[in-house]
Image (cartoon, rainbow, N blue to C red):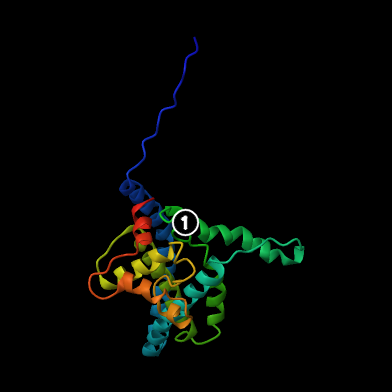
Amino acid sequence: MTEQFQLPTVPRKPFRVYKREQAAISRHTLYPVTAMYTLYSVTMIVVGFRSGRPLTAFAFFLGGIPVWTLFEYLSHRYILHAHFKRSKHKYKFYKTLANKYFDPLHWEHHERPFDGKHINGEWKDMLPVFAISILLSFLLPAYSAPMLMAGVVQSYVLEEWVHHCVHFYNFRNPYFRYIRKHHIYHHTSSGMERGFGFTSGIWDIVFNTRFPEHVRHRLYGRGKTREHPHAERIVSQP
């Protein structure tokens, strides 16, 4: 008589438990990003205010906000949502590198939108871009381009936290409710080709990639709004 063995079944975690665990993973990725780049921004603010032109320095710092929102829109639309093919030609190595590093980066986030490992970037991801841009900025006075880059860097930190909060929390202030609906609908099959702004929908208006009017009305129309059915499903399932 043969004995039959049955593997023990692993109980499925409640979604709230899974979501809480993934939020912790995402936060631990964000901590070094926040510490490193905020330290740089604060240092530059001190330098800018001691440069003799504090108001000009502050104006350039604030100018980094729209510069970053444009960069986040363009990179999200044309890099993170692009498909890069490997090249058979060795001199086109950049295509192979793009396929290796960029292709899995954002598509895995769309496949598993609550996976804490794919919500935010690590500190080293933006370091090459920031390092080159910051070094070039110091060709100009400290109160100008370097302060602009400090604003860009700090805006990046804020964008990472906004993206984190959009996926894991449900704050009630008007801005957060708007950007959460905007981004969550982007995660649906109907909205994936539009709504590329992470922290703002302004550039979607400028480049004509905002959601259709009937979708906007359902997402953030006047009165009591109700999220799109696809958006409801994506926030209620792991």
Q: State the count of labels.
A: 1
The residue lying furthest to the front in this view is 214
Residue found 52% across the figure and 76% down from its top: 134
- 196 sits left or right of 174 in the view: right
Picture coordinates of residue 66, whole percent (x, y): 43, 81
Residue 188 location in percent, x, y?
43, 62
| Residue at point 76%, 63% (across, down) | 90
Three-letter code for the amino acid on which mark 1 is drawn: His
Seen in the picture, residue 70 relative to 235 is either above or below; the reply is: below
Mark 1: few, some, or many residues within 10 Å (few <14, many ≥20)? many
Question: Depth check: 38 or 115 in front?
Answer: 115
- Return the x and y of residue 54 as percentages of the image width and height: 37, 87
Asked whether residue 50 appears in the rendered view, the answer is no
Q: Which residue is labeled 1 in the image? A: 118
Disc 1 on helix, strand or loop? helix
Q: Nearer the viewer, residue 220 or 85?
A: 220
Tell me what residue is drawn at x 46 percent, y 86 percent: 144
Q: Residue at x 49, y 84 (%)?
A: 145
Q: Residue 49 appears in which quarter of the rendering?
A: bottom left
Q: Can residue 132 be seen here?
A: yes
